[in-house]
Image: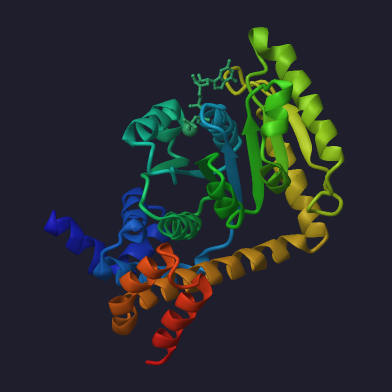
Amino acid sequence: MPRNDARLTDTVADLAAALRAGDRRALARAVTLVESTRPDHRDAAEALLAAILPLTGGATRIGISGPPGAGKSTFIERFGLDGVAGGRRLAVLAVDPGSKRGGGAILGDKTRMGELARHPAAFIRPSSAGPQTGGVARRTREAILVCEAAGFDTVIVETVGAGQAETTVADMVDMFVLILPPAAGDELQGLKRGIIELADLILVNKADGALAPHARETAAEYANAMRLMPSSVPGWEVAVRAISAREGTGVAEIWDEVARFRAVLEAGGLWAERRAAQAKAALWAELGDGLVARFRSHPAVAARLGDSERAVVAGACTVTAAARQLLDLFSGG
Ligand SMILES: Nc1nc2c(ncn2[C@@H]2O[C@H](COP(=O)(O)OP(=O)(O)OP(=O)(O)O)[C@@H](O)[C@H]2O)c(=O)[nH]1
Ligand SMILES: [Mg+2]
């Protein structure tokens, strides 16, 4: 596909203009560009991001996470359809950071959001699994900016609950929503406290049919547990709601929760603070990735790296000493 590739790079200014005008093919191409790891695409992506910078920042960025099968995609479809019916423009980035899960899950997501995907005011982009978290994080961060430049007022990032993934996504959104299935008491205990602490809103899904009472009990238990934890936002008590994504019960109301949350943050000056924290986290993530890449490709470091790893593995050298030697080689030239 050399012709397509050329089209990705040769007209960054045109692409930025088309993006701003709401051209959907330009949007898809721009996201493809920021997702590409090819060096010439990277250069074009960086030029594009610089060109659209003044157009970014306008959306409410919502992270939606939770264990596999909790109903995240089903929720986003219903929530999104309610949103676009109310005049919103919504972009969904479905990120799958675990390389264990293949294209099947992604395709499943796409069909589960089929009606929303066809809506002219919605854009759904599944992002396939990449080898490193760093890559996924950067692609998602940049795809959010591209969607904002294209005029979407809400950007949702769906990620499956897999430890590190939540923290990565929580660092790049304004509001972090956790979707959980109805659970037994011991599962409740097992849910990582660290993840619960990230949540601004908790939705216990599948409150329908035979599961309804169970879902409501689970929600009450989470609400109790949340009371024992300090909220990360003064003035905001993390809400726990029982919903049914399948039947739509309680889903439209979540738009009000989002608006309420945003209002609380804005009133306390915390909205700007969160955005500042996002920008700083992004900068440090880039610096970390960039430094590691430069470190690995530094000739003196590359020549020694294998030996140092083996020495550490064999117990012939302490980790601190090996790291210091490599760092000295790196900063020595
Ligand atoms: N009873 C009931 N089932 C639901 C509800 N929401 C989703 N499901 C079912 O749960 C299963 C998983 O739904 P998804 O929306 O794909 O869940 P997900 O969290 O996006 O899953 P992954 O992306 O694979 O982690 C599907 O079989 C859905 O039909 C609900 O509100 N009630
Ligand atoms: Mg899903």
Image coords of residue 50 (percent x, y): 43, 73
Residue at image location 43% in from the left, 43% down from the top: 98
Colour logic: rainbow
Residue 80 position (above or below residue 53): above
User: In the rendered view, does 296 fall on the left or right side of 312?
Assistant: left
Q: Residue furthest left?
A: 2
Q: Residue furthest bottom?
A: 332
Q: Is residue 264 visible?
A: yes
Residue at image location 70% in from the left, 13% down from the top: 212
Image coords of residue 108 (percent x, y): 39, 28
Q: Nearer the viewer, residue 197 or 16?
A: 197
Q: Nearer the viewer, residue 107 or 122?
A: 107
Residue at image location 76% in from the left, 26% down from the top: 219
User: In the rendered view, does 158 fall on the left or right side of 224?
Assistant: left
Q: Quadrant of the C terminus?
A: bottom left
Image coords of residue 279 (percent x, y): 59, 68
Image coords of residue 193 (percent x, y): 71, 42
Q: Is residue 155 visible?
A: no
Residue 42 position (above or below residue 223): below
User: In the rendered view, does 157 fall on the left or right side of 296?
Assistant: right
Q: Nearer the viewer, residue 20 or 216?
A: 216
Residue at image location 51% in from the left, 42% down from the top: 159
Residue 210 falls in which quadrant of the image?
Answer: top right
